[in-house]
Amino acid sequence: MKVTNMTSNRTGREVPNQFDIVGDEGNIYFQSYRTVIVAIKKGQVYLDHNWDYSKTTSKYRNQFLGETRKETEAKIKDGTYTVTNLN
């Protein structure tokens, strides 16, 4: 398993408490503090029920997924993304 701090797009510095995780099995995760927010398993995106918990979580979730909140909401609505308990 490899855990790295996310890097701010604005400053280029590491961001505390926001993590990219690559599991030994190849799954990819975004973790904010102690909560897994996004899991990508075999190409399928799963969001935790707390996917939109705070401004900071949302900012780095958007960065991780490479999209806006509006795009994420549309993908939840059309079934592209699954909302589930990741913790």
Image (cartoon, grey):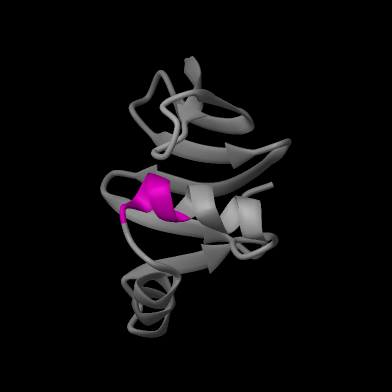
Rendered residue at 64%/59% (across/down):
55
Nearer to the camera, 84 or 51: 51
Nearer to the camera, 42 or 62: 62
Rendered residue at 26%/48% (across/down):
43
Residue 58 drawn at (x, y percent): 56, 58
Range of the magenta residues?
62-66
**Up-down: is 56 above or below 5?**
below
**Up-down: is 36 above or below 53?**
above
Q: Quadrant of residue 85?
A: bottom right
Q: Quadrant of residue 17?
A: top right
Outermost residue, right side:
34
Nearer to the camera, 75 or 66: 66
Rendered residue at 40%/45% (across/down):
64
Residue 15 drawn at (x, y percent): 57, 29
Can residue 63 be found in the magenta stretch? Answer: yes
**Up-down: is 84 above or below 5?**
below
Q: Quadrant of residue 71?
A: bottom left
Name the main secondary structure of what is drawn in magenta.
helix
